[in-house]
Image: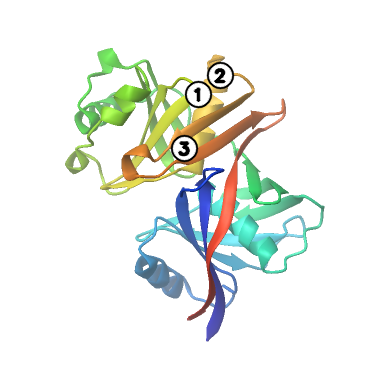
Amino acid sequence: MQRRFTQVDVFGPAADGFGNPLAVVVDGDGLSDAQMAEFAAWTNLSETVFLLPPTTAEADYRVRIFTIDNELPFAGHPTLGSGFAWLAAGGVPKRSGQLVQECGVGLVQLRTDDDRVAFAAPPRRRTGPLDEASIATAEAVIGIPRRQWVAHEWGDNGPPWMMVELADAATVREVRFDTSRLGALEHLGLIGRDSGRFAYEVRGQVGAWEDPVTGSLNASVAQWLRARGAVPADYVATQGSQLGRRGEIVVHDDGTAIWIGGRVRPIISGTVEL
């Protein structure tokens, strides 16, 4: 069966360049779990999203989010990209300029403005300092002892991020991950204070694979930094420099929610046989 398909770039810079690609199967209804998982593995992208009818009247649409080897209850750049793709495919939201996405963690609010999309960061399911075992894992993976870290924290909002703040952006960029020390489903995020246009440099490692630009990680980072008073209500982070990407993540705290936004643009449109 032919199904509408698009591939979009999420968190790309305002000028030329790329952020993180996302595959979206627009007509996902009727596919089995196995079919979704198989196609997501075939795309070989960090995530593939399947758009589905919502199961609650509050939502505009529902998504299922697959990596190449598992399903996620929530992820950031798939949330932005799927909202954009749903609108581009003719979706009509219940509220102009706003979307409600249904996914594994529940309902997620989005705001749209042309090619800019933002989501309200969901609550973290686990917070507080990393446990000793996780600290030891992070030390082994990044090769920097904890005594040289600025801070560490759990940021589990679906993906279970272990977050570590290092001395500065240059230190973050210099890290060479020893992926043999990280489990296939373990998530490690690094941040370091930057200067100039960007407040922080961010990197996200999942098992043996480094994510170019990560919405879920940046959402947890923003909640952590805001709670510490380390950043103003509005700031821009960057991610992907070590992979040749120039991701730009726009953060806005409106006093009620922290919004994680970025640019989305279509790259490929057509159909797939599924």
| Number of other residues with Cα within 10 Å of mark 2, as a class: few under 14, some 14 to 19, many 20 or more | some
Question: In screen coordinates, is 133 left or right of 70?
Answer: left
**Outermost residue, front side:** 16
- From the viewer's perspective, is 34 left or right of 269? left
**Residue 157, visible in the rendered structure:** no
User: Are the residues tagged 2 and 1 within 8 Å (C-beta)?
Assistant: yes
In this view, 25 is above or below 19:
below
Cα distance in 3D space between marks 2 and 3: 16 Å
Q: Residue at x 37, y 15 (%)?
A: 150
Q: Which mark is residue 231?
A: 2
Q: How many marks?
A: 3
The numbered mark, 2 or 1, whose residue comes first in the sequence reads 1
In the rendered structure, are the residues bearing label 2 and label 3 in contact, judged by CB atoms less than 8 Å apart?
A: no
Q: Which residue is mark 1?
A: 199
Residue nearer the viewer, 174 or 35:
174
- Give how far across and how far down residue 111 sits, in percent: 71, 46
How many angstroms separate mark 3 from mark 1 (CA)?
Answer: 15 Å
Which of pointers 3 and 1 indicates the residue nearer the eye? 1
Residue lying at 39% horizontally and 58% vertically, measured from the top left: 70
Q: Position of residue 16 (x, y in %)?
A: 50, 48
